[in-house]
Image (tube, rainbow, N blue to C red):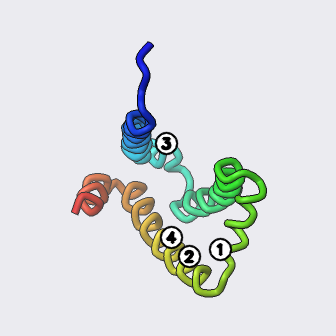
Amino acid sequence: MTDRTPAQNDVRLGVFAAAAACVLWGGMPLYIHAVGFADPVEILAQRILWSLPAALLAVLAIGGARKGLADLAAAFRPRLFAMLAASSVSIFANWGIYVWAVAHAHVMEAALAYFI
């Protein structure tokens, strides 16, 4: 067994995270096509609905209960909350356009838009 430094462990974790993100991102059009019977608005609504509890669990699991709740409370400060709301609207528009494009057989155009 080889001893790895913390920096090497971080690199390995980063490579794994990047590979997982690419696999998930590349598989997203397949998922959207598989649920093509649903309206794009419904797909987006489900994503929003299920992201909230997943994000809450991630905040609590990664930061621990006490630190996670403190981080969550900090998100409700007016300036930070406004910035988070603006970014949420941007992400909503981004994903809405992406889901609509994939659901209407514009996968290549959507992929090129992200590439650009």
| Residue at image mark 2 | 84
Q: Disc 3 marks which residue?
A: 34
Are there few (<14), some (14-19), or many (20+) residues within 10 Å of tag 3? few
Look at the numbered disc 1 and give the secondary structure of its residue.
Answer: loop
Callouts 3 and 2 close, C-beta under 8 Å: no
Q: Work out whether mark 3 precedes mark 2 in sequence or the reverse, and give the earlier one.
A: 3
| Residue at screen point 64% across, 56% down | 55
- Mark 4: which secondary structure? helix
- Please name the amino acid that badge 2 sits on: Leu
Taking the spot 68% from the left edge, 78% from the top edge, the residue there is 76
Is residue 27 in view from this perspective?
no
- Looking at marks 2 and 1 on the same chain, the residue that comes earlier in the sequence is marked by 1
Q: Specify which label sits upstream in the sequence, 1 or 3.
A: 3
Residue 92 tag number: 4
Q: Tell me which label, 1 or 4, sits earlier in the chain.
A: 1
- Whole-angstrom CA distance, mark 2 to mark 1, is 8 Å
